[in-house]
Every structure is written in structure tokens, then in C-alpha cells.
Amino acid sequence: DQQVKQNSPSLSVQEGRISILNCDYTNSMFDYFLWYKKYPAEGPTFLISISSIKDKNEDGRFTVFLNKSAKHLSLHIVPSQPGDSAVYFCAAHAQGGSEKLVFGKGTKLTVNP
Amino acid sequence: AAGVIQSPRHLIKEKRETATLKCYPIPRHDTVYWYQQGPGQDPQFLISFYEKMQSDKGSIPDRFSAQQFSDYHSELNMSSLELGDSALYFCASSLSFRTGPEGEQFFGPGTRLTVL
């Protein structure tokens, strides 16, 4: 049972355009959401997070939007750069003591020059 | 800035052998997590420690054990290795949600374990 779902295994965009990566979740107990970027042979790198009390968090070129009623979040990267090409994982944390992250299966983003 | 350190980076073992993976968290981080990522899979939580005590346990086989030491480094011990144990093993550390709101987990580079 995949509690965090990233339904697009891959996404390709042109340099300078917007990249939108989507994530859906099923567990209503999740209260903290994170996006990680991963290059091959490296560990996931934290990008940006959002608490369930917010609907938007912005950090430079990266913005995460959270729609709690739809159990949906998205990561916007604008403008996209070739160096953004990587696998992006959506992750969530549930309230109630456990701090383990539950990951989606990732979306491979390719930004073409 | 100091990051999470994992050793070794690569490990090759035979079936039924044992392996020990080490993790050194970011200084002042009080919580350590272990994740396993199989080929083409998402990272799966194994076990975590807060202030040297086990705080949560995921889908970790009984053949695996882990501990966190007084200097906060952690070791994942894996015995009777099986072919299916071949994976990337990530360690992450954080300041626990119990100690502050910034609970982001920071990952090490991983140990790639290959069981032949």
C-alpha cells in the first residue's frame, strides 16, 4: 500500500521553463512534507519542506504547494536549469511520535538545454 | 558544513556472511535513521534512534540489528546475508521533532551493499 504516490515516473522540460512535480498521499495523519533531490550514487538531498498548517512555502526557485483537502502537493521549479536534472522524491511524516519518512517512488526530471 | 558520513561506501559480501555499516550523524543531531533502497525503489525505513534509544522500527529483518553509541554514531549489523539484501543503505540524521520544529532529515551518501 503506497501511502505517498508520485504517478509520473519521468518529466522532461526545456531549460528556462517551469517544472511541476506532483505528489499525492493517502494518510490523513501526515503533517509534514518534504521534497528531496537525488543524483545517481548519492544520498537524497533535502530541498524544501512544508508543514500541514501552511499551503505554500517558497525558497528561491523552488515552491511547494499543499492542498490538504485534495491530499496533494506539488513542487514548482522556475526557471528550470539543466543542473536540476535528477530524481525527485516526495516524502511525508506522520504525527504521533514516529518520525520516519514515507517516500514516493520518485520522478526523474530531465531539463533539456 | 558537516554532513552525514557513512562507511564503507561500497561493500561486497558472500551469502550467509555478516556486514557492519557505520553512520556518523551531523554534529548536534540527536536522531539517526536507517533506510534501505532497492534497485528502482523508494527508500524504505528500517529503524531509528533518538538519544541512543531505539525510537521506531520499520520493515527490518530479524537478521539485522542496529545501535547508537554514546558519541551518537550508529551501526547497522546484518547477518546471514541474502541476495535480496543487495541495496543502497542510507543513514539520515536530524534534530528530532521533540527538540525543535526543524525536523528535516539529512541523508548520507549511502553504502552500496552487494551480496554475491
Image (tube, coloured by chain):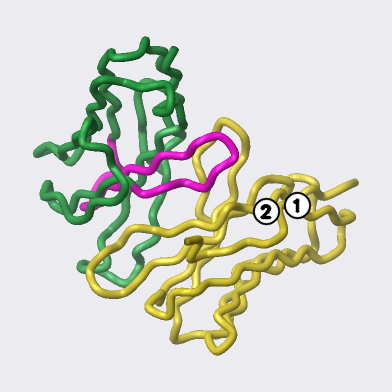
Chain colours: A yellow, B green
Kindly identify the residue that appears in the image at 62 percent across and 34 percent down.
A40
The verdict on a common chain for dots 2 and 1 is: yes
Vertical relation: B84 (above or below) B55 = above
Query: Closest to the observer: B60 or A64?
Result: B60
SS type, badge 1? strand
Describe residue A98's horizontal placement relative to residue A18 as left or right.
left
Q: Residues within 10 Å of mark 2 (few under 14, many from 20)?
A: many
SS type, badge 2? strand
Kindly identify the residue that appears in the image at 81 percent across and 66 percent down.
A18
Residue B75 in view here: no
In the picture, residue B21 is in which quadrant? top left
The image shows residue B93 at horizontal and vertical percentages of 32, 48
The image shows residue B40 at horizontal and vertical percentages of 59, 39
In the drawing, what numbered circle is on residue A107? 2
Which segment is the magenta one? B24-45
For disc 1, the marked residue is A10
Describe residue A36's horizontal placement relative to residue A109 as left or right.
left
In the drawing, what numbered circle is on residue B61? none
In the picture, residue B25 is in which quadrant? top left
Describe residue A59's horizontal placement relative to residue B77 as left or right.
right
Taking the magenta stretch, the answer to whether it contains residue A20 is: no
Taking the magenta stretch, the answer to whether it contains residue B28 is: yes
Tell me which numbered mark, 2 or 1, is placed earlier along the sequence: 1
Vertical relation: A22 (above or below) A12 = below
Of the residues shown, which amino acid type is indicated by label 1? Ser
The image shows residue A73 at horizontal and vertical percentages of 60, 74
Query: Closest to the observer: A14 or A104?
Result: A104
Describe residue B52's horizontal placement relative to residue B26 as left or right.
left
Q: Chain under label 2? A: A
Q: Chain under label 1? A: A
Residue B13 in view here: yes
